[in-house]
Amino acid sequence: MGRSTPAFSFSLLASLALGFVLVVQTQQNPGFISIDCGATNAYIEKENNIAYQTDEGFIDSGKNMQISTEVIYRTSLQLSKNLRSFPNGTRNCYTLRPDRGKNNTYLIRASFWYGNYDGKNQTPSFDLYIDTNYWSTVGSSIFFNEEMMYVSQADDIQVCLVNTGNGVPFISALELRTLGDDIYRLGSGFLQLHWRYDIGQSSKTYIRYPIDVYDRIWTAKNYNLWFILNTTYAIDLSEDNDAYKYKVPGDVVRTAQRSMKASSPMYLQWTPSISTNRWIVYFYFVEIERLADGLQREFTISINDNQIKTTVSLEYLKPVIVVSTAVTGSLISFSIESTNNSGHPPILNAMEYYTFSDLSNVPTAQDDVKAINGIKVMYYIERESWQGDPCVPSYYKWDSLNYSYGNPPRIISLNLSSSGLKGLIATSISNLTAVVSLDLSNNSLTGSVPDFLAQMPSLRVLNLSGNNLNGSLPQTLLKKKPKKKGISVAPIIASVAAVLVLISLGAPAVLWIIKRRQIQNGAAVTTTTTFGGSTGTLELSKNRHFTSTEVARITDNFRTIIGEGGFGKVYFGRLHNGSQVAVKMLSQSSKQGYKEFYREAQLLMVVHHRNLVSLIGYCEEFENTALIYEFMSNGNVRQHLSARNPNVLTWSQRLQIAINAAQGLEYLHNGCKPPIIHRDLKTPNILLNENMQAKICDFGLSKAFVTEQDSYISTCPEFHILGHSSQKSDIYSFGIVLFELITGHPAIIRSPEGSMHILHWVTPFIERGDIQSIVDPRLNDQFNISSVQKAMEIAMACVPMNADERADMNCVLSELKECLTVEIISGRSQRMGNSERRSEFDTTTMELDSHPYAR
Ligand SMILES: *[C@@H]1O[C@H](CO)[C@@H](O)[C@H](O)[C@H]1NC(C)=O
Ligand SMILES: *[C@@H]1O[C@H](CO)[C@@H](O)[C@H](O)[C@H]1NC(C)=O
Ligand SMILES: *[C@@H]1O[C@H](CO)[C@@H](O)[C@H](O)[C@H]1NC(C)=O
Ligand SMILES: *[C@@H]1O[C@H](CO)[C@@H](O)[C@H](O)[C@H]1NC(C)=O
Ligand SMILES: *[C@@H]1O[C@H](CO)[C@@H](O)[C@H](O)[C@H]1NC(C)=O
Ligand SMILES: *[C@@H]1O[C@H](CO)[C@@H](O)[C@H](O)[C@H]1NC(C)=O
Ligand SMILES: *[C@@H]1O[C@H](CO)[C@@H](O)[C@H](O)[C@H]1NC(C)=O
Ligand SMILES: *[C@@H]1O[C@H](CO)[C@@H](O)[C@H](O)[C@H]1NC(C)=O
Ligand SMILES: *[C@@H]1O[C@H](CO)[C@@H](O)[C@H](O)[C@H]1NC(C)=O
Ligand SMILES: *[C@@H]1O[C@H](CO)[C@@H](O)[C@H](O)[C@H]1NC(C)=O
């Protein structure tokens, strides 16, 4: 986050008045958590009567440090004198447990002052995370606050410092304030503070707790161009007033500025360092001048040339709060301008500037988080990575466990082999209900093997050998194992073989394993898989989950292969209700395919459109991973264009296919936020159903929620820039598809002389204006030449070398519809006996949408 001024600068702190003695509260400030990081004792800050605690109980890692004695005299504020630094581990997290728990709004403020504590004179830079989401990058040499308004997603809130390789992270203070009345709550995201101004204030440098019960820090601000005013009268903060729930302090709004005369607007602007930032501005207005009878101050607030416009009229001493909707741009400007019937200059009492950020990374399932933390506490597991969310973001996943991606992600394997665990087997393990593989071998676990292990629904691999467990195996566990002793392999259901293995390694050791055979080749494997990567806004639950047994039944034991891709084989299947499906299995040998397979699943679970092939369900069971799609009985477009296909597609069918595909692509580019780039559009990836309706498939290379490195930033500006250029690469691919539809040739034309790209083949003909020679001879002249000509022009508009010159999907789509109109009209006029082909039509009179060809 680059910003031009710190929200709260060191000089302000330094100028604090000293010697002000307040009555020390015996009870802590309710709803507050105030940590002076690096402090050795708890204390009450005299300046504001806030009780600060040490780090204890909030974080285990890191060490306490003090800022350099050369600069320590510059500050009177105790919390800035020391800090906690984190030389070890990539991610170190504070855990805050506010009383109100989840789904409540909190102000969270982290303070930093490097103060050359390490004597290196080099300010480090590192990232700050709020739970699983990126908050900000810290790298300031002066005292600095990062502050946000956050709606907690879980009972705990974690603030994490992430080492990005640019120095050792540290923190000076961490504060949480519980807000009431659902204020500062805008959708599912957080508001990051940039500035908060008490306008017209001239007696204090800032106002905070106890004057502001929520401990917002209002910095005094006076603009030279404007007139300063203030009042000593009490502001009306009664419950029937707008401002009541914001609890904005009277001292803040009793001061204001107004423009010099009624005809001059108040005008402010700034240039954000990131133009994609979504700005939200809170304006506070109170009439503090007593105006002559009957007159009222009235003004209009406009942001970014009327992007947002609202009119406010004020009553004496009654506050009005205006919250803008999100504005973006490389220049943000707003004006407050008197209306003609006001006759008084516009006024402004206070304001807050925030940017809105999404919470794109869904945290791990809370029951899993609680269970794994229970295990961590019970066995005193101290590992650098065991902080923050166990699985998200995947960069900072805890060691020794793996998870399945999904909404929410789940822990699916835990390997605490040789980890020095002592004591009984932790009951919290029973709450890791998605765990498939559990390895607690080679520890010092004692007691008996608990019954709950047999109840764990997904557990397939359990290794308890090398412990001091006693007693016998619980009956329930025994029921799961086959009769034979030793290693045995016994297929249970069809080809999905659940194999129970009991290995007796002498009295104290128990090992129980269920192996699951791989479907395709029958080779038994026990590898676990990471369903790593992105989380996005996936909703797994919307799609049906199938067990591997069901998959085997649906596909009649994988009887009919209808295709084979990079991931593995695609089988024909039939659901209970008789509807036909295609079942894509992820082959075990396709390690690389995992990412793409999951990317596709993720995308299709959130994105739905009639021209995108739809996902019906999925199977995610240990090694058996399958995606189940609607069945597209007419195969792919490439097959239809092939010279071997006796049923030649007509020109209007081809146009219809192009329009369908264009609609699908247009939806991905313009209907999805952020836009989705297919990246692998080609005729084999356009499928046709029984009605010859075309749908795009194969989203394995698509990009949307995921960036190259990982998934967790969906709002980063680079992404949009990337998105822009890659959209144009889809357009290029679409142009090639159009050329294939026109010519019937594949993208790479193979001949005895060698291979040639279709574009190289068509270009000389187009340059000569010779359209007839390009058109698929199998169309047998059954087309309207101007329709084909237009299609050719559209295709050409898609393929310029310079991506910026390529058309956009919206435009391509509407032009294609016109092509179809031309073709249909000409077809109709032919049927009506008019054999003369018209070359120009007034397409504007056509109601394309009412025509059955237009969907
Ligand atoms: C960092 O790790 C080293 C080596 O493991 C250890 O000696 C040191 O105490 C650790 N420091 C902190 C602050 O945890
Ligand atoms: C969270 O709180 C809001 C407002 O108080 C409420 O409308 C919403 O239903 C709550 N959501 C959950 C999941 O409890
Ligand atoms: C109000 O205005 C008076 C006179 O201009 C000034 O002395 C005083 O400091 C102002 N009060 C505040 C709170 O700004
Ligand atoms: C206000 O008055 C000015 C000049 O008399 C006029 O140009 C403007 O359109 C008026 N605005 C409105 C909103 O009536
Ligand atoms: C997690 O998955 C990786 C890659 O598949 C594997 O190497 C590792 O052993 C797994 N870890 C656990 C704890 O299962
Ligand atoms: C657990 O990890 C150990 C090594 O740390 C490895 O030997 C063992 O195979 C793993 N167990 C499983 C079930 O993957
Ligand atoms: C068991 O753990 C010890 C250390 O705790 C280690 O030295 C040994 O190699 C481990 N044995 C196996 C089989 O992993
Ligand atoms: C398991 O989860 C349930 C529900 O969240 C909770 O009530 C229970 O205490 C948990 N059990 C253990 C052993 O952690
Ligand atoms: C179970 O764990 C022990 C000790 O870590 C190991 O030697 C053994 O190979 C494991 N068994 C299986 C089947 O992975
Ligand atoms: C198992 O060991 C525990 C102590 O580790 C003991 O209390 C218990 O009686 C033992 N149970 C059996 C069946 O030996």
Image (cartoon, rainbow, N blue to C red):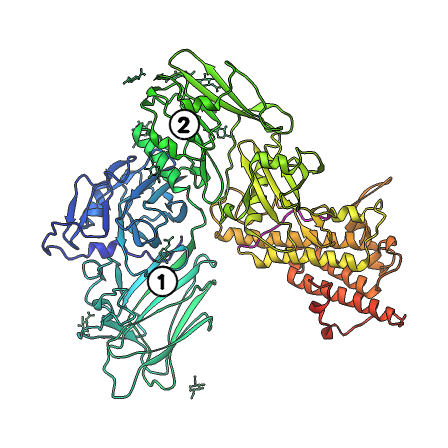
Q: Which residue is mark 1?
A: 353
Nearer-the-camera pick, 14 or 107: 107
Query: Up-down: is 408 above or below 592?
Result: below
Tag 1: amino acid? Tyr
Q: Residues within 10 Å of mark 2 (few under 14, many from 20)?
A: some
Residue 427 lies in the magenta stretch: no
Q: Which one is earlier in the sequence, the residue at label 2 or at label 1?
A: 1
Secondary element at tag 2 = helix
Q: Is residue 806 left or right of residue 303?
A: right
Q: Is residue 9 left or right of residue 363?
A: left
x 67%, y 38%: residue: 570
Q: Which residue is mark 2?
A: 453
Please provide percent x and percent y for residue 224: 30, 72
Residue 676 lies in the magenta stretch: yes
x 32%, y 82%: residue: 261
Please provide percent x and percent y for residue 612: 64, 52
The number of discs equals 2
x 87%, y 39%: residue: 752
Q: Is mark 2 within 8 Å of ligand 8?
A: no
Tag 2: amino acid? Leu
Can residue 503 be seen in the rendering of this structure? yes
Nearer-the-camera pick, 723 or 452: 452
User: For residue 192, what is the image quadrant?
Assistant: bottom left
Can residue 400 be seen in the rendering of this structure? no
What numbered label is drawn on residue 45? Answer: none
Nearer-the-camera pick, 339 or 655: 655
The magenta segment is 674-683
